[in-house]
Image (tube, rainbow, N blue to C red):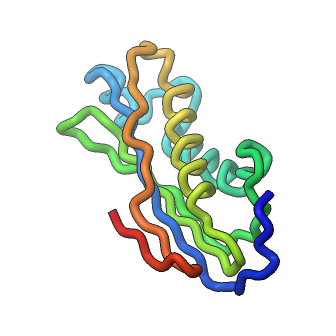
Amino acid sequence: MVDISHKGVTVRRAKAEGFVSLKPKAFTALAAGQSPKGDVLATAKIAGIMAAKSTPAIVPLCHPLILEKVNVSCELLKGKNAVRVISEVACSGKTGVEMEALAAVAAACLTIYDMMKWAGQDMTIQGIRLLHKSGGKSGVYER
């Protein structure tokens, strides 16, 4: 791991997004809460939070952080038959939380896929990207 012992503690924030595109029939079932596996969006949110907290276990060389905020939300995009997943992560620390935000989105998208695959595997996970990063020496990044 990179030595961060010389860095100062600052408030670190990151926001990320990703999308799951579904066929119209599968999207309609998701929006109506008709998955036989249960509440898809609530489960995706929990999966995203758990992934953010577990990032050092799944991404080699990531520093373990004490996260002070993890929020995952899912927005149904009816005109696109898609779900937009957004994560926001914050902590006071010596290194950023970008990987935690991205891991949260990825896990939430994978959970939606897993819980909706009964309706067909022709879903697409795409556009996982960092939207915002602040804190630390490098300053603010905004997409």
Expressed as whole percent of the image width and height from the top left, the position of residue 142 reads 36, 68
Q: Residue at x 76, y 45 (%)?
A: 60
Q: Is residue 7 left or right of residue 101?
A: right
Q: Nearer the viewer, residue 102 or 109?
A: 102
Query: Which quadrant: the C terminus?
Result: bottom left
Expressed as whole percent of the image width and height from the top left, the position of residue 23 reads 30, 21
Q: Is residue 129 above or below residue 87?
A: above
Q: Nearer the viewer, residue 108 or 65?
A: 65
Expressed as whole percent of the image width and height from the top left, the position of residue 4 reads 76, 72
Q: Residue at x 48, y 79 (%)?
A: 139
User: In the picture, residue 62 is in which quadrant?
Assistant: bottom right
Query: Which quadrant: the N terminus?
Result: bottom right
Q: Residue at x 27, y 32 (%)?
A: 81
Q: Residue at x 47, y 63 (%)?
A: 15
User: In the picture, residue 79 is in which quadrant?
Assistant: top left
Q: Is residue 63 left or right of residue 42?
A: right
Q: Nearer the viewer, residue 121 or 100?
A: 100
Expressed as whole percent of the image width and height from the top left, the position of residue 126 reads 39, 35
